Amino acid sequence: MGAAPSTPRLGEAGAPPSPGAAEQMFAALVGEKAYPISSEFWKQLLELPLTLQWPRDRVLQACHAFAQNNYQTKHLAKILIHLVWCLEECTSTTSATSVVYRRAINAAYISSIFLKFIIENAKADNWQELSLDIDKNEKKMEKFPAENSVEYFLMRGVLNYIGSVDVSPESCYLHHELLNLMLVLMSTQLCSGPSPEPKDVHPFIDAAMLQDSSIVVSVVRKLLLNFVTRPKFPPNGSHPMFSDDGRPGVLQRVGSAAANFVLLPYYTFNYLVSSTPEGATSQLADNSLLVLLVMIHYRKCISTNESFPSNNIYMGSDTNDKEAQVFHENPYCKTLNNAKDNQYDRADVEGNAQDGPVVRLSFASLFDALGRCLNDESSVLLLYSLVHGNCDFQEYVLVRTDLDTLLMPILEMLYNASRKTSNQIYMLLIILLILSQDSTFNSSVHKLVLPAVPWYHERLMHQTTLGSLMVIILIRTIKYNLSKLRDVYLHTNCLAILANMAPHVHRLSAYASQRLVSLFDMLSRKYAKLAELKNDKSHKVISDHMEADNIADDMSTELHIYTDFLRIVLEIVNAILTYALPRNPEVVYAVLHRQEVFEPFKNHPRFNELLENIYTVLDFFNSRMDMQQLDGEWSVDKVLEVINKNCRSWRGEGMKMFTQLRFTYEQESHPEEFFIPYAWRLVLSQGFSFNPGAINLFPLEIHLDDAPSTEQKV
């Protein structure tokens, strides 16, 4: 490497650096000369107040120069190592000074700038451009563990700091920069395809997966706590990267001038200039959640010639469309799934204590935080991850008496489905489907009475049950899907939830009962139209016989789908009348009022046995109505009075008992193909910018419509 270049002069000791000296430091950082890791250059660079103003072209020029010269200088690896040493100093010092924090923040920030540029512009997917190999015989490198790679050393230092140091007024800005750095480090995934392959290289997140369990547990716990507590930045605090007069320095200039090309997005810095407290309180929580979601959904594919311990893998279960894939176990996902409530631990009570460290936090606080934040799509994915993967948290949710805390935001978002992404609608419905698998949940939602539903505009709702509102919103979602999305899986999910709820329905409201019968009517009209079209097509001569066959096949498939939908709706009505008729006079009224909609299907081979039960109910109540000596016209109140009276004497005679429909949710065989792109879509949607030309994880302009599948188990 030749003689070590001299360190640029920064002026007299103790005096602030001149603009020229600071510019000289940055020119040296991106230049051709390599500075040893032991050089005073690094300390002086990281202590700069960074008050330069650089135009956009200078920023890009500097990044290009840094990336080109990094092959020889190894400056990226060196600044990353210095970052870890700065973090160690911040951790070990009982009262770290502002200068110590400034060095760590500047190291994290400068690293983010050049790392992001190199990742976005890499020409190969093995990340040789990072040049992370470094001469471990250099002076001062005796402090560097010989067996560690730079990426492992970096991730251990960053994760250890995030997990072990509480967020405080002094440390909050450093936590913020480290979380942003984490997103940059893990963004190599954006450059890979949607399906993980053994050849994929992700040096930093792979290193994160190899960390000690104690670090993994502390990081997952701290990220969850950040989400729950939503720590605030000091209202009058000054960021170390700002000059004394509050003007943005060179790094701020880089962020705002070249965000789309080089840096983290501008929102990263909005907390520094926000005029409202709300604008300054959410970034740590939001970024903590994004980092957690990316980490728990990451999957590392194992090559076929790689040896692995049998207790540290899982395999894709579907071997029909691709060979079975083998994955390393994700310790962050496992840790989240094993998290325990610090108020009550079932394992402790049953004497089956968990081996090793476990995340313990207040499920009550986590439940409440989710309820407050579910309007954010990232929070919806966290809730899904918890209720699907963590049995203890799912059980905690099911025994809560205030289920409206979670369900009302979910139902409101489904009510506004036209303003939501298809992925978000899927996640919301799957959460409801998972919860509806529990009979206690289905009973509880019908006991919780809502004083009002202010966001439901089509009709005033007073003193309606949460269960009735669920039925109304699910049917509304089906109708929206019929007119807009036309997605079979969405229909299936909605109907599956209603089917799980049906045997436990209690005092379903008049409006919900009417909507249920109207749903059957709407689907039956669609079915009739399809049957008529199919019949017309079969009588027409089409010159292209292949086209005729294709049209016939498509229409037969759609007709079969609607036949299944109609049968499920009939099963839902049948289950309510079979298992819960005395408790649901409004359902009986709705069926009586619209009984003509069932007539066309009375002799249909797929429906006749279910309709036999419905007509048994109709015959019973019609006969009771005929027996009434009535003066004047029938009114709704008079009809309901007769129904209520005869509900009490209903014994279910002549009803056939069918096996209850029960739907359970199962993840698709390759969930990583959905969740890895989905997690990164959320990161990008929250303002993280990335070179569009480098993204291979998903198509940028096309929404990912693949969704986790639902399988029926009866």
Image (tube, rainbow, N blue to C red):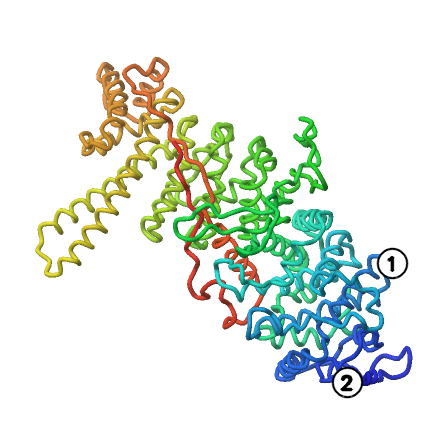
Q: With respect to residue 90, does 43 lie above or below?
A: below
- Taking 546 as reference, is 417 left or right? right
Quarter occupied by the C terminus: top left
Q: Element type at marker 2?
A: helix
- Amino acid type for the residue under numbered disc 2: Gln
Residue 120, image x and y in percent?
Answer: 57, 72
- Amino acid type for the residue under numbered disc 1: Thr
How many numbered discs sit on the rendered protein? 2
* Residue 406 marker: none
Q: With respect to residue 670, does 260 lie above or below?
A: below
Q: With respect to residue 702, does 465 lie above or below?
A: above
Q: Residue at x 23, y 34 (%)?
A: 597
Q: Residue at x 87, y 58 (%)?
A: 93
Q: With respect to residue 485, does 618 lie above or below?
A: above
- The image quadrant that residue 527 belongs to is top left
Name the residue tied to disc 1: 93
Residue 544, image x and y in percent?
Answer: 13, 61
Q: Residue at x 82, y 78 (%)?
A: 41
* Residue 24 marker: 2
- Taking 421 as reference, is 591 left or right? left
Pointer 2: residues within 10 angstroms few (<14), some, or many (20+)? some
Q: Element type at marker 1?
A: loop
Tags 2 and 1 touching, CB below 8 Å: no
- Taking 284 as reference, is 629 left or right? left
Measured in 3D between alpha carbons, the distance from the residue under mark 2 to the one under mark 1, in whole angstroms, is 31 Å
Name the residue nearer the viewer: 82 or 51: 82
Q: Residue at x 34, y 28 (%)?
A: 587
- The image quadrant that residue 254 belongs to is bottom right
Residue 319, image x and y in percent?
Answer: 42, 48
Quarter occupied by the N terminus: bottom right
